[in-house]
């Protein structure tokens, strides 16, 4: 009997062992970007492609790293295809009791239309971007002086800023194509109505995380600082993201230093890995103590985009891992396409 | 609710045959008390764990996905001891009417219990799964399978076959997932429970699994079947040596622990899906508790101090154990009410504060809650009232 109790104690200790969760990325192994104040004189344009208004965080390290550049943030769609504008989905996912902020206008009312959904998503986007100016002053924008122009037959909202420009397009949620994105980006850069500073294009960034199941399955992890053997990357293969990445790839010849395409860390093409400083990441993705679904929403993404989050709250983490459903990791990996 | 003659209680039904001094066994009680003692001890721990005023330490919170914390072991312990109890219940023919009534009552009460404990009453997303429903399905399955076999050997085979089949099924399923990993986006519960229950599952399906869905019930079946095997081994002691039964239960416990550890190398053990490795190892823990109680109460104390002294020593735990279903679900409801109720200061904090001379607010509330249920159970036991489905 004593032997039996001993064996059970041993098996229970084995059962309660630390699960094989990935460790935090070793501190210092991945360079951490350092926020800078906006330059008096930018040296070039940084075209920053965002497929949907909630994808902007995916490449924030590129935004900070290019601190001497004038960001031209191009939001390609307005995210109206989300199912979260449906009454049931909206009510299930919005957790105001945990600190999530309801978008304005309410996209789930009976009178709500696709236009209401667009407006709701843009209000959340504005909330996140405004909060981000605390740590990334370059994205401070003058929303009161927004104006509309027409470029290539498409209405474009231009939001000016001291050190950045925001361009809001509506190329169709879930219907983006690389050709269309590339063409519109070229037209925007050439348009005098948009009023961009007369600077060369230094970098194009696709803030569009993309990983297919096939890619994750055949991943070949060699750099244990940014990927972990046996821990596949988060699978996210939305076509809009692929379109933004392919467009950025095609635009590389326009640039001085190339295009940065956000990817998963064990992508063989990933050549650059940058980490956000922990305080900045927390300001975006912070959660209170406890289980994520019931944790207090502290970060701006958790609060403003909480109604869009999946599976419940946005899962924070150093790496975009399938097991932990981390779509917006602290360490961001890029495939850099040279001009 | 039933008010029973002690002779009719499950534990008593195990034996009414007097010991045969001629075969060398000392005169023994007709009663096996170890199951009630083990359940009582388990309830002591469970009540205290459920009565912690926040902040709750990590080991008293369920693991978010993979991994097992202390609190993840409590319900499986209850299930494995219930498995022992089902051997006692179904060793003889139990009426189908009684089984059907228990299943229906548990299913209905389970839906109500889930709604109350989660404060979720929206019919379109009302949760249909839950711990009582899990228990109901197990009772039905065990009643049916007891028509096939009522022997320890038969139930050992059932346990092992179920574990092997479940392991193969998991291996097949996880081979379809990215990196062979079970995740909230790729797991059999999402595929099966999600398809059957949809928004009526755990957290309206948002968490990609149901810890009490059909897949988890499969795991709980293995855990309970391990307990049933041990129960039949204990029942066999009626006609044989209790010492021999003790050895057999110990061997069975080691078998489950070892097999579970082996399966853990193939399928990650965790509670959220009640994987077969978890089912066997958590079941082994329940068996160990039963084994210890059996050794102390039904073998050692009975042999050295006699039946009446053994009964007196065991009485407080037996009182809790005999009403385990009522106490287990009752204390969860009361704890939820006291810990969540109240305005800024919960009822639990107020009670703890008023009794803080007992060793601080948190200790005081846990002790007070434990005392409440112990008194209730003792009064019911004293009057031989046992609440069952």
Image (cartoon, rainbow, N blue to C red):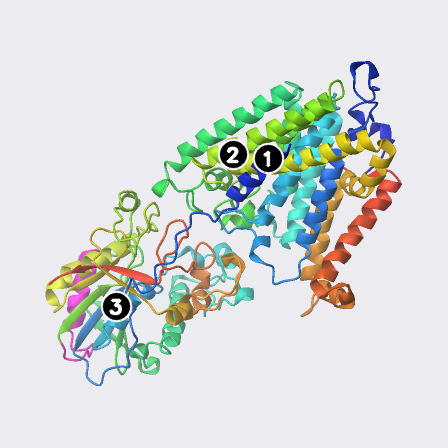
Q: Where is residue A186 drawn, in percent x and y?
A: 15, 67
Q: Nearer the viewer, mark 1 or mark 3?
A: 1
Relative side of B184 to A231, left or right: right
In this rendering, the answer to whether B113 lies above or below B241 is: below
The stretch in magenta equals A177-199
Which residue was labeled with disc 1? B284
C-alpha separation, residue under disc 1 versus residue under disc 3: 53 Å
Q: Where is residue A177 drawn, in percent x and y?
A: 22, 55
Q: Where is residue A31 drawn, in percent x and y?
A: 27, 66
Which residue was labeled with disc 2? B260
Which quadrant would the C terminus of chain A be assigned to in this image?
bottom left
Residue most extreme to the bottom: A40
Same chain for the residues under marks 3 and 2 in the image:
no
| Proximity of marks 1 and 2: CB atoms separated by less than 8 Å | yes
Relative side of B226 to A305, left or right: right
C-alpha separation, residue under disc 3 versus residue under disc 2: 48 Å
Q: In the rendered image, which quarter is residue B134 located in?
A: top right
Which residue was labeled with disc 3? A62
Q: In the rendered image, which quarter is residue A308 located in?
A: bottom left
Residue situated in front as seen by the camera: B79 or B252? B252
Label 1 crowd bin: few (<14), some (14–19), many (20+), radius 10 Å: many
Label 1: chain letter: B
């Amino acid at each position: 009997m004593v032997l039996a109790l001993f064996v059970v104690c041993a098996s229970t200790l084995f059962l309660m062992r630390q699960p094989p969760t990935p460790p935090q990325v070793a501190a210092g192994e991945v360079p951490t970007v350092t926020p800078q104040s906006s330059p008096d004189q930018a040296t070039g344009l940084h075209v920053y492609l965002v497929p949907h208004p909630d994808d902007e965080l995916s490449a924030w390290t590129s935004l900070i790293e290019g601190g001497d550049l004038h960001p031209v943030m191009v939001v390609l769609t307005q995210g109206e295809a989300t199912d979260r504008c449906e009454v049931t989905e909206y009510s299930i996912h919005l957790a105001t009791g945990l600190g999530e902020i309801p978008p304005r206008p309410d996209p789930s009312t009976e009178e709500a239309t696709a236009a209401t959904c667009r407006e709701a998503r843009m209000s959340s986007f504005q909330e996140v971007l405004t909060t981000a100016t605390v740590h990334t002053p370059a994205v401070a924008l003058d929303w009161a002086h927004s104006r509309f122009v027409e470029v290539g037959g498409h209405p474009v909202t231009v939001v000016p800023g001291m050190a950045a420009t925001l361009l809001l397009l509506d190329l169709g949620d879930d219907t983006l194509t690389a050709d269309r994105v590339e063409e519109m980006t070229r037209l925007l850069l050439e348009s005098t109505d948009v009023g961009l500073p007369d600077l060369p294009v230094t970098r194009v960034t696709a803030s569009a995380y993309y990983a297919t199941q096939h890619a994750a399955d055949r991943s070949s992890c060699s750099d244990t600082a940014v990927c972990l053997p046996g821990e596949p990357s988060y699978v996210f293969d939305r076509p809009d993201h692929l379109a933004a990445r392919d467009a950025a790839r095609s635009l590389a010849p326009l640039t001085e230093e190339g295009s940065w395409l956000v990817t998963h860390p064990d992508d063989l093409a990933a050549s650059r890995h940058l980490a956000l400083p922990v305080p900045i990441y927390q300001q975006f993705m912070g959660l209170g103590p406890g289980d994520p679904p019931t944790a207090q929403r502290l970060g701006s993404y958790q609060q403003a985009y909480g109604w869009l989050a999946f599976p419940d709250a946005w899962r924070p983490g150093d790496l975009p891992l399938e097991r932990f459903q981390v779509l917006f990791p602290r360490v961001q990996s890029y495939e850099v396409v040279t001009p | 609710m039933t008010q029973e003659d002690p002779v009719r209680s499950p534990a008593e039904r195990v034996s009414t045959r007097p010991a045969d001094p001629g075969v060398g066994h000392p005169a023994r009680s007709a009663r096996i008390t170890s199951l009630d003692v083990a359940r009582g001890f388990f309830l002591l721990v469970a009540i205290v764990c459920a009565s912690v005023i926040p902040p709750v330490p990590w080991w008293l919170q369920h693991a978010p996905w993979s991994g097992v914390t202390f609190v993840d072991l409590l319900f499986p312990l209850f299930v494995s001891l219930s498995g022992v109890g089902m051997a006692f219940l179904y060793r003889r023919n139990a009426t189908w009417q009684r089984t059907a009534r228990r299943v229906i009552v548990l299913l209905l009460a389970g839906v109500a219990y889930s709604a109350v404990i989660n404060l979720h009453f929206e019919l379109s997303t009302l949760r249909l799964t839950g711990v009582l429903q899990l228990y109901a399905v197990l009772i039905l399955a065990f009643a049916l399978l007891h028509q096939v076999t009522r022997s320890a050997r038969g139930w050992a085979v059932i346990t092992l076959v179920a574990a092997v089949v479940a392991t193969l099924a998991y291996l097949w399923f996880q081979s379809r997932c990215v990196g062979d990993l079970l995740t909230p986006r790729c797991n059999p519960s999402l595929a099966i429970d999600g398809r059957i229950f949809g928004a009526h599952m755990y957290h309206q399906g948002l968490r990609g699994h149901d810890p009490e869905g059909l897949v988890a019930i499969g795991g709980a079946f293995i855990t309970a079947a391990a307990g049933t095997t041990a129960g039949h081994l204990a029942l066999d002691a009626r006609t044989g040596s209790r010492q021999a039964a003790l050895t057999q239960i110990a061997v069975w416990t080691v078998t489950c622990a070892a097999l579970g550890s082996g399966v853990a190398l193939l399928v990650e053990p965790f509670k959220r899906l009640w994987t077969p490795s978890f089912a066997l190892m958590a079941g082994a823990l329940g068996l160990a508790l039963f084994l210890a109680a059996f050794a102390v109460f039904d073998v050692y104390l009975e042999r050295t101090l006699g039946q009446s002294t053994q009964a007196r020593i065991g009485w407080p735990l037996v009182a809790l154990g005999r009403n385990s279903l009522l106490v287990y679900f009752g204390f969860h409801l009361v704890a939820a009410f006291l810990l969540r109720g109240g305005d800024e200061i919960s009822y639990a904090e107020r009670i703890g504060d008023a009794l803080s001379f007992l060793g601080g607010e948190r200790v005081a509330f846990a002790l007070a809650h434990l005392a409440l249920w112990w008194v209730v159970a003792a009064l019911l036991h004293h009057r031989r009232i046992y609440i069952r489905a």
